[in-house]
Image: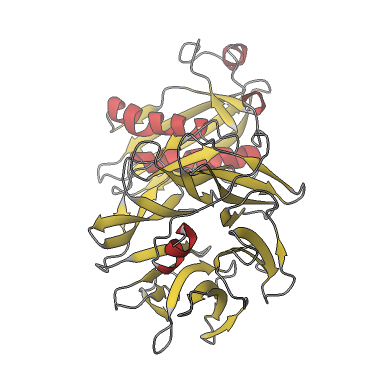
Amino acid sequence: MPRFLVRIFLCALVATGLWAQQTEVVLSATSSAKLVLAMATPKVAGLDQGTVAAEFTAVLKRDLDESGVIAMLTERLPAEGSPAKAWKEAGAQWLLTARLTKAANGDLQMEASALDTAAEKSVFSRTYNANRIVPLRYLAHYLADDLVGRLTGEKGVASSRIVFVRQAAPGVKEIFQVDRDGAGLVQLTRHGSLTLSPTLATDGRIAYVTYKGGAPEIWGQRRKDGPHEKLYPVSGAGGMLTSPAWSPDGKRLAFVQGDRRGNSDIMVLDLGTLRARRLTDSNGINTEPCWNPNGNQLAFTSDREGGPQVFLMQDDGSNLRRLTGEGLYNASPAWSPNGAMIAYVSRFEGKFDLFVYKLGEGKAYQITTGVSTSESPAWSPDERRLVFTSNRFGSSQLFTTDLSGRQILRLTELSNCQSPRWIRGR
């Protein structure tokens, strides 16, 4: 059986893709466009300086370096207490200072400010308060996000989180969550079965497919922070179910329902009425739906014209058209947060790579190269990076990349991972 059919009907859920003949183009900003920031050694009270250096300063520097818009000044730093002019001459455009205080009850306070070294005036000032259970690295994440927000107008993603599927035991897959920096691993489901294909609403609600009852069912949260409960089918068996996807307004779930003939179609469930309607109706496989940010279009994978390709349609199933024009195998579309791009995977000579299709240009750009398999792309909330899975170190692990493909970072060393999804954590 072709890999495409195996993935859909056995719920292997490993993204597949195509080969497209485009030249790699850098889509992200160059380092010369980044703001250069220097950081003075934080002042501390009630905390160990070494602990602060390891759990706050190092984390903050990494967060800012990976932001894509801020470059940390690390060489030829002026002496502590030097005037703004000295920091400007060293190359810093902003100078960041911070004071961290630990109270007797363990609560934390951080006062942070940034100075424009040319104008010699404050461009940022904020106080953060956290209780004793909040790790120092979280304060670093919050500060990094706010500094990026001050610079760009959009908060950064250092405090965001990634949800994914991982094999927990032979024959058992569960859903896990990890912080953006790879720390803070949390297991979200404990069904003791195949639990697959997580999707996240903008308010953090989760939905997924689980085999906990034998046949596949869609489970998730009807309200924010609510319990996990069955969402579909309301009664009886729903057949083969895969690939749920929250609509941007959180009121609908697109999903895939298969039949005994080996066909599958895109469905949409209205969570208010609990009624599902069919959007596609063809002999073949229609799968992997994802919404545009406005919630009025979906991208999906279909083999209606032979091999799998990425198609678009309106949210009522009308205006069906093919997106990907080159290559024999295109799949796993992921619409970017601002709606201007669609990431997907491509296959060539047995290897899978990430591509980004720019809708305004009608062109696709290659992000990763075929030295290993790269699959299951999902966008960061700020649209500057993609999270994906790759076997470049053996088993399937989580990685992130900027849109140039030059800054590929391994998120964790966890093995047997699939289907990552990225969401803001605060």
Of 366 and 413, the residue lying toward us = 366
Give x and y (percent) for residue 112. Answer: 48, 35
Picture colour scheme: secondary structure
In the rendered view, would you say 9 is above or below 340? below
Of 255 and 382, the residue lying toward us = 255
Give x and y (percent) for residue 135. Answer: 32, 43
Q: Is residue 205 visible?
A: no
In the rendered view, would you say 76 is above or below 136? above
Count of numbered circles in the view: 0
Q: Is residue 356 left or right of residue 47?
A: right
Give x and y (percent) for residue 94. Answer: 59, 25
Q: Residue furthest right?
A: 361
In the rendered view, would you say 60 is above or below 287? above
Q: Residue at x 42, y 63 (%)?
A: 6
Image-quadrant location for residue 191: bottom left
Q: Is residue 399 left or right of residue 121?
A: left
Q: Residue at x 37, y 39 (%)?
A: 137
Give x and y (percent) for residue 409. Answer: 45, 35
Image-quadrant location for residue 167: bottom left
Q: Is residue 168 left or right of residue 329?
A: left
Q: Residue at x 45, y 15 (%)?
A: 80
